[in-house]
Structure formats: C-alpha cells, structure tokens
Amino acid sequence: MKTLQFSTIINAERETVWNAMIASDTYKLWTSVFTEGSYFEGSWGEGERIRFLSPDGSGITSVIAENRLHEFISIKHLGSIKNGIDDVESEEVRRWAPAFENYYFSTVGGATEVKVSMDVEPEFEHFMVNVWPKAFEMLKTICESQARPK
C-alpha cells in the first residue's frame, strides 16, 4: 500500500469548499471524473457508516473515522461493495483494508487549500495520479462559481 498526496488552492472560503465536497449534488459532479454517476449513501458524521458507489452498485464501504467541521475529514475504508453487497472479510479485501482517505482544509490568504492523502494499492496509483488533478479542477470550478464576490 502506498500513500498518495494531492493538493489545490481554491478561491473560496473553507465552508464553501467543505460543503461542495460533501453535499450530495456537488459530490456527484466533482467525483464524476473517477466514475461517471458516482454517489454516496450514508452520513459524513464522525463514527457514521458511508458507502461510496458507482451506478452498477459496486464501490467501497467505509466509516467516517474523524470529522472536524471545515478542517479535517478522515474516511476509513473497510471493504468493497459488489452487486450492492458489502464485503469486509474476503481475502481480497483483507489485503488492503483498512485504508484511509484524509482531507485537510486550511485558509491561505483569502483562499482555501485542500489536501488529500490516501492509501492506494499499486494497481490504482497511476489512475489516481491522473484523475485527482481533474477532480480538483472540477471542485475548484464548482466552488469558485459559488464563492461570494469580495
């Protein structure tokens, strides 16, 4: 398992960026670069279960390990989802789970820096390195179009 890190600066307040990342309608937009039609079921509250899904019912089952409003979210991925069924026990899942995906939000001048660090299996590294910048561009577009003029 390797930990990858990505970051971007968005010309919007932390609250705007935070909300765009986790609100259902905007989540679907910025995550579409990973898989078209991506969505989540569940809650972003600390200790809550959350499922990250694609339209075919596959995805990842997780828990929110930590949530500090407008500052930090830690997602603990517990297993995979196939045909709508959570798998947290198979040999395949035990090879990589648990894996963490952490988001950090900080104010830089009048903008927000968003950093993500995520545990990734080697076979997904190339994909993530290519897709995260596109996801951040999409998020940046969403947030900056919602930002209040200064």
Image (tube, grey):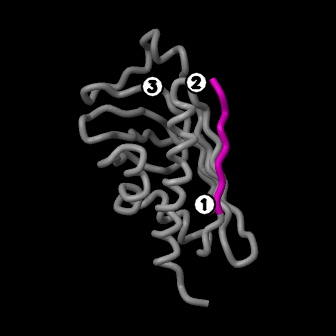
* Residue beneath disc 1: 69
Look at discs 2 and 1 and give the one toward the viewer: 2
Query: 98 or 144, which is in the foreground?
Result: 144
**Residue 10: x, y in percent?**
61, 68
Sooner in the amino-acid sequence: mark 3 or mark 2:
3
Residue 86: name its quadrant. Answer: top left
The Cα–Cα distance between marks 3 and 1, rounded to whole angstroms, is 25 Å
**Residue 112: x, y in percent?**
66, 68
* Residue beneath disc 2: 122
Q: What amino acid is found at the position of numbered circle 2 in the picture?
A: Pro
* Residue beneath disc 3: 79
Quadrant location of the N terminus?
top right
**Residue 12: x, y in percent?**
59, 75
**In the structure shown, which secondary structural element does the residue marked by tag 1 occupy?**
loop
The Cα–Cα distance between marks 2 and 1, rounded to whole angstroms, is 31 Å
Left or right of residue 33, residue 16 in this image: right
- Residue at position x 52%, y 30% in the image: 124
Sooner in the amino-acid sequence: mark 2 or mark 1:
1
- Residue at position x 30%, y 25% in the image: 82
Range shown magenta: 1-8
Q: What amino acid is found at the position of numbered circle 3 in the picture?
A: Gly
- 121 versus 131 height, above or below: above
Quadrant location of the C terminus?
bottom right
**In magenta segment, residue 4:** yes
